Image: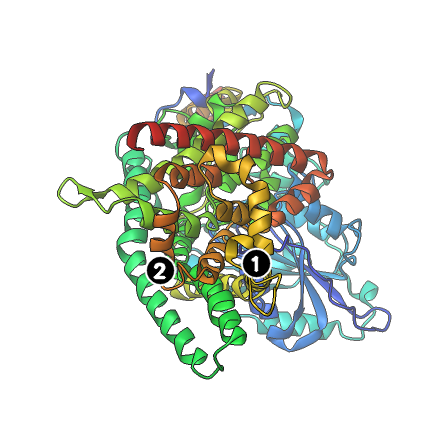
C-alpha cells in the first residue's frame, strides 16, 4: 500500500452527450516509445508516467482533453504496438480498445497515430493497419524538431497524400504543433464522420509483414524521407556501458554509490527534517491544553506520523535515482546485461525491467510484467517481484540500521558498515527473488524458452521538469499515505494503549488492550527475538510496511518510560541485537502490502497466486528471522 | 550461407531470410528485420550474448539462438550477383 500503490484502477470519465457523428472518444496509438504518453499529458494536463524505454504504458488510460480546452472529448492513451497482431499482453490491450472489445472503455471515434519521425520508415508499417481500421485518423510526426536538427527530411504534405490522411508535425516534449490537433478535432465537429473518412487506395494486403514493409518503404521514399544521422553518442556511451569489463563494474559502482548517497546526504537531511517536525509538533502542542487531548495529538498521532515522515528525503533520493535510470534509457541496457543471469534461472532479460522498477514499488512493477510475452514467465516474475526491496522497506531498514549498526567506516571512510548492511538486505531480497523464480521455472511454471527481443532506446538527457514532477508526485503519495493510513493506525493504537480506564486512571502500557494483545502473540514471535511491541508492528504492517515505523513511534511514544527518548534510542534499549537483525531479515522477505496482493489478484485473476505468494514469503521471513536471531545472538549476544 | 550470429561486431549483413516460428517472425519483421534490410552488429552484451543489432536506424537486442535462424549475405555479394546478372544479360 505504500506509495504508488492504489492498484491502478481508474474511473472512466463520464461521457459527454453528443449528437450522432460527433467525436467523443479519441485514441492515441503508435509504436512503443514514440511519445504517446508525453502527448497524452500535454493534451489532458494529466501526469501519466513517461520514461525512455519501450513498454512504460501497459494499460489504457483515459482523460479529458483539458490541455487544449476540449473538455468535451475523452482521450485514451494506449500501450505501444508494432502491428495489430498482439505479441504480448500490453499490446492486446491496445488492440482490444481500438476494436471496441474492451469492457468499460468506449470504442474510439477517431485516432491520433503518433510516429517517431526519427525512424519513420519502420513506424509507417503500423500506419497501414491503423488506417485500415477506417476511423478518422490524424497522423502525428513526433520529434520532427529533433529529426531536422540531425539532418533528416520529410515532406509531410506528400505523406498526407500517400496515406490519404492529414499529417501534422508535433513535438510532444516541447508542446509545439498541437494546434493541428485542434483543427483536426474541430473540423469533425458536427460532421458525420462517415462522410469524411479518407479511403487510402494504396494500402497493402493487411497482415503480411513483408508487403506492409515494402509499402512503408515506398511511401517513405515517395515523401523524400531521409532518416536523420543516428546519434553517435548513444553508441559511444554504450561502448562503455556495455563494455565487457567496465559495463558490469560501472553498474555495481552506481548501485553502491546510490546507497552511499542515501546515507551520507539523505541521513543528515532526514535528521534535520526530523528536528523541524519535532519542533513543529511542540509548537502546535503549546496551543492544546494539557491532558489526554495533547497526549493523543502529540504522543499518539504526531510521533507516529512524523517517525515515518522523516524518511521522505531518502525516499525522494531513491526515486530520483530510479527516475534517472528510466529516463536516460539505461534500464533497457540493464535488462540486456542481466539477460545472461536471468536465463540461468529460466527467465529472460525482459523480466529484469519490472524487477528493477520494483525497487521503487512492486505495484507498478507487477503491472509492467505485461510486456513479458510468455505467460508462465510473466507469472513467475509477478510472484517474485515483491521480494525486490521496495521503497516502503527503506524507512524500516533506515530506522533499525541507525539504531543498531555502529557507524564504522573502512578504506579511509569510503565504505560504511551501515551502507554494507543496507546493501546486504537489498541483495538478500534479490537472491530470494532469483531462487524462487528458479524453483518456479524448473517445476510448475516450466516452459520452452521464449526469444529475447528488446528494442534499445537512444539515450536521452532527463529533463528537470520530468524529474521534478516525478519527485513531486512521489512526495504527494507519501504524504497522503502518512496522512491517511498511518494517521488512522496511530490514532487507533493510542486509544487502545490507554484503555481500559480503571477508576479514572489509564492503565500501564503492558496492561492496556494493546499490551494484552501484544502479549497474546508474543509466544509466536519470541523465537525470533521480538518483543510484544514488534509483534503489534508486524500486525499493523500487513497494511503497508512503513506502518511498522509509525506503530513503533506511537507505542514508544505512549510509554511514559520511553516518551522522552528518540525512537532510535528507545528501540536500542528495548530490543536485543539479534531481534533487530532478525526484524530486518523478516522485512526483507515478508509480503506486507495489501496493495501488492490486490494487484497480483487482478493480474492473475485468482486469489490462489497471492495466497501462495503470501505463505511462501511468510515461511521464508519467519525461517530467515529465526536463523538470523540465533546466529547473531550466538556470535555477539 | 551465413547466419546473423556469425557476424562480428562492426560487420554488416544483408538479410536474406528468417526461419522462425510465425509469431516471432512477424514481430521481428515489424521491427525492421525484413529480407534485403541491412543489419549491423553494434555491440555484444558483456557476457557475450545477447547481441545488439542495428536495423533501420534502431537498435534491437537478440539472443544467439534467434540470430542463428536469420540468414544473411555480405552486402557486396548482392551487388556482385547483380553485376554478374547484368553481364550475363
The scheme the figure's colours follow is rainbow
Residue at the far right in the pictured view? A20
Instruction: Measure the alpha-carbon separation of dots 2 and 1.
Output: 45 Å
Looking at the rendered structure, which numbered label has been put on residue A37? 1
- Percent from the top left, x then y, of residue A119? 50, 48
Q: Quadrant of residue A281?
A: bottom left
Looking at the rendered structure, which numbered label has been put on residue A566? 2
Element at badge 1? helix
- Percent from the top left, x then y, of residue A48? 57, 60
**Mark 2 against mark 1, which lies toward the viewer?**
2
- Percent from the top left, x then y, of residue A569? 33, 54
Q: Is residue A250 left or right of residue A56?
A: left
Residue name at image x 42 percent, y 33 percent:
A428
Vertically, is A528 above or below A281?
above
Residue A298 seen in the current view: yes
Mark earlier in primary sequence (2, 1): 1
Q: Is residue A200 left or right of residue A229?
A: right
Vertically, is A126 above or below A428?
below
Report crowding for label 2: few under 14, some 14 to 19, many 20 or more residues within 10 A (C-alpha): some
Residue A229 seen in the current view: no
Q: Nearer the viewer, residue A400 or A89?
A: A400
- Percent from the top left, x then y, of residue A548? 50, 51
Location of the C terminus of chain A (image quadrant): top left
Amino acid at each position: 500500500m505504500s506509495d504508488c500503490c492504489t492498484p491502478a484502477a481508474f474511473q472512466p470519465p463520464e461521457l459527454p452527450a453528443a449528437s450522432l457523428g460527433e467525436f467523443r472518444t479519441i485514441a492515441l496509438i503508435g509504436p512503443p516509445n514514440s511519445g504517446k504518453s508525453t502527448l497524452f499529458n500535454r493534451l489532458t494536463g494529466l501526469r501519466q508516467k513517461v520514461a525512455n524505454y519501450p513498454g512504460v504504458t501497459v494499460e489504457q488510460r483515459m482523460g479529458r482533453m483539458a490541455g487544449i480546452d476540449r473538455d468535451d472529448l475523452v482521450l485514451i492513451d494506449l500501450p505501444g504496438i508494432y502491428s495489430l497482431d498482439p505479441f504480448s499482453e500490453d499490446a492486446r490491450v491496445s488492440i482490444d480498445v481500438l476494436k471496441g472489445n474492451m469492457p468499460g472503455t468506449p470504442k474510439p471515434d477517431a485516432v491520433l497515430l503518433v510516429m517517431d519521425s526519427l525512424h519513420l520508415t519502420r513506424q509507417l508499417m503500423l500506419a497501414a493497419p491503423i488506417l485500415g481500421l477506417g476511423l478518422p485518423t490524424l497522423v502525428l510526426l513526433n520529434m520532427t524538431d529533433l529529426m531536422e536538427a540531425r539532418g533528416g527530411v520529410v515532406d509531410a504534405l506528400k505523406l498526407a497524400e500517400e496515406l490519404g490522411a492529414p499529417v501534422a508535425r508535433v513535438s510532444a516534449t516541447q508542446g509545439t504543433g498541437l494546434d493541428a490537433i485542434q483543427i483536426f478535432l474541430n473540423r469533425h465537429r458536427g460532421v458525420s464522420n462517415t462522410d469524411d473518412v479518407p479511403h487510402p487506395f494504396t494500402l497493402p494486403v493487411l497482415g503480411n509483414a513483408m508487403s506492409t514493409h515494402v509499402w512503408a518503404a515506398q511511401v517513405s521514399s515517395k515523401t523524400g524521407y531521409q532518416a536523420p544521422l543516428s546519434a553517435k553518442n548513444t553508441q559511444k556511451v554504450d561502448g562503455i556501458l556495455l563494455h565487457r569489463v567496465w559495463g558490469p563494474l560501472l553498474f555495481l559502482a552506481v548501485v553502491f554509490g546510490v546507497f552511499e548517497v542515501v546515507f551520507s546526504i539523505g541521513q543528515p537531511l532526514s535528521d534535520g527534517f526530523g528536528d523541524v517536525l519535532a519542533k513543529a509538533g511542540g509548537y502546535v502542542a503549546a496551543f492544546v491544553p494539557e491532558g489526554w487531548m495533547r497526549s493523543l495529538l502529540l504522543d499518539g498521532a504526531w510521533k507516529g506520523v512524523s517517525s515515518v515522515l522523516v524518511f521522505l528525503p531518502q525516499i525522494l533520493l531513491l526515486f530520483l535515482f530510479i527516475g534517472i535510470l528510466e529516463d536516460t534509457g539505461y534500464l533497457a541496457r540493464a535488462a540486456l546485461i542481466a539477460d545472461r543471469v536471468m536465463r540461468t534461472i529460466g527467465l529472460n532479460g525482459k523480466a529484469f525491467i519490472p524487477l528493477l522498477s520494483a525497487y521503487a514499488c512492486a505495484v507498478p512493477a507487477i503491472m509492467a510484467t505485461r510486456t513479458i510475452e510468455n505467460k508462465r514467465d510473466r507469472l513467475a516474475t509477478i510472484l517474485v517481484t515483491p521480494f525486490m526491496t521496495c521503497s516502503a522497506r527503506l524507512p524500516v531498514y533506515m530506522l533499525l540500521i541507525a539504531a543498531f549498526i555502529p557507524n564504522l567506516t573502512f578504506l579511509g571512510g569510503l565504505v560504511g558498515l551501515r551502507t554494507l548492511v543496507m546493501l546486504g538486505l537489498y541483495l538478500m531480497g534479490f537472491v530470494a527473488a532469483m531462487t524462487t523464480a528458479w524453483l518456479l521455472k524448473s517445476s510448475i511454471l516450466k516452459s520452452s524458452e521464449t526469444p529475447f527481443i528488446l528494442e534499445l532506446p537512444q539515450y536521452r538527457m532527463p529533463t528537470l521538469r520530468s524529474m521534478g514532477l516525478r519527485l513531486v508526485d512521489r512526495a504527494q503519495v507519501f504524504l497522503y499515505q502518512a496522512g491517511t493510513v498511518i494517521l488512522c493506525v496511530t490514532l487507533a493504537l493510542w486509544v487502545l494503549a490507554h484503555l481500559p480506564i480503571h477508576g479514572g486512571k489509564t492503565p500501564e502500557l503492558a496492561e492496556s488492550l494493546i499490551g494484552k494483545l501484544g502479549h497474546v502473540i508474543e509466544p509466536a514471535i519470541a523465537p525470533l527475538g521480538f518483543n510484544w511491541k514488534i509483534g503489534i508492528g508486524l500486525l499493523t504492517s500487513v497494511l503497508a510496511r512503513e506502518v511498522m515505523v509509525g506503530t513503533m513511534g506511537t507505542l514508544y511514544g505512549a510509554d511514559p518510560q520511553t516518551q522522552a527518548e528518540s525512537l532510535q534510542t528507545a528501540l536500542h534499549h528495548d530490543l536485543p541485537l539479534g531481534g533487530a537483525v532478525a526484524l530486518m531479515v523478516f522485512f526483507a522477505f515478508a509480503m506486507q502490502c495489501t496493495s501488492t496482493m490486490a494487484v497480483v489478484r487482478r493480474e492473475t485473476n485468482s486469489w490462489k497466486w497471492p495466497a501462495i505468494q503470501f505463505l511462501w514469503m511468510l515461511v521464508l521471513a519467519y525461517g530467515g528471522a529465526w536463523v538470523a536471531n540465533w546466529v547473531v545472538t550466538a556470535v555477539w549476544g | 550461407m551465413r547466419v546473423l550470429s556469425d557476424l562480428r561486431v562492426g560487420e554488416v549483413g544483408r538479410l536474406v531470410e528468417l526461419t522462425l516460428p510465425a509469431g516471432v517472425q512477424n514481430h521481428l519483421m515489424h521491427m525492421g528485420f525484413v529480407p534485403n534490410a541491412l543489419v549491423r552488429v553494434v555491440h555484444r552484451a558483456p557476457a557475450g550474448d545477447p547481441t545488439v543489432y542495428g536495423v533501420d536506424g534502431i537498435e534491437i537486442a537478440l539472443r544467439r539462438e534467434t540470430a542463428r535462424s536469420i540468414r544473411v549475405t555480405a552486402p557486396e555479394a548482392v551487388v556482385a550477383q547483380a553485376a554478374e546478372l547484368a553481364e550475363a544479360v
